[in-house]
Image (tube, grey):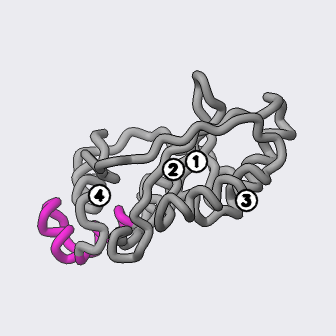
Amino acid sequence: MMNHRPNGTIRRVTTRNLDRIDRLILKQLQSDGRKPVTELAQEVHLTVSPCWDRVRRLEEEGFIRGYVALLNPDYLGVRLLAFVGVRVDRTIPQVFQQFRIGIEALEEVVECHMVAGGFDYVLKVRVADMQTYSRFLSERLAALPGIAQTHTFVAMEEVKSTLSFKF
């Protein structure tokens, strides 16, 4: 199985089985990525050095992709959240590649997923307001080559938002 990295390179996905301690480490870091390794080691019943070795191995093997700060979009003036379904005009590799390159340059797009069904891609877009979104749609997104159609869904209320998942 392959995994595309943000820098465009491809990494083989590790499929080894995780032991109980590795799973505990991942669960703890998933809920608090800033947890000091001394505290993490206590919670998984290891000393600091072997705990740190496991964390580094999990990072190197790709189980941990990185660490981030979760910012509050309301405080930063990007209150409007929209999901955009995109259809491309032809489903050929060149069009998909051009679309991927174009999307990478659009900082308003915080996520992009190729999907099966009525659209080829679904985008998650964050902007200040509807006027800004309208400009983004008409001047930036629609300007990408190969786009045949878009359909926008504006979020009215965030019901659930988490980066944690069960494994």
At label 4, which amino acid type do we have? Gln
The mark found on residue 112 in the picture is 1
Residue linked to disc 3? 139
Up-down relation of residue 157 to residue 7 (above or below): above
Residue linked to disc 2? 124
Residue 94 lies left or right of residue 137; in this view the side is right
Magenta segment's dominant SS is helix
Residue 124 lies left or right of residue 139; in this view the side is left
In the image, residue 126 lies at what x, y percent? 49, 60
**Residue at the (45%, 62%) spot, across then down:** 59
The residue furthest right is 94
Residue linked to disc 4? 30
Tell me, yes or no, whether the two marked residues, 3 and 1, touch with CB atoms within 8 Å: no
Q: What stretch is highlighted in magenta?
A: 36-55
Numbered disc in front, either 3 or 4 = 3
N-terminal of the pair, mark 3 or mark 1, is 1
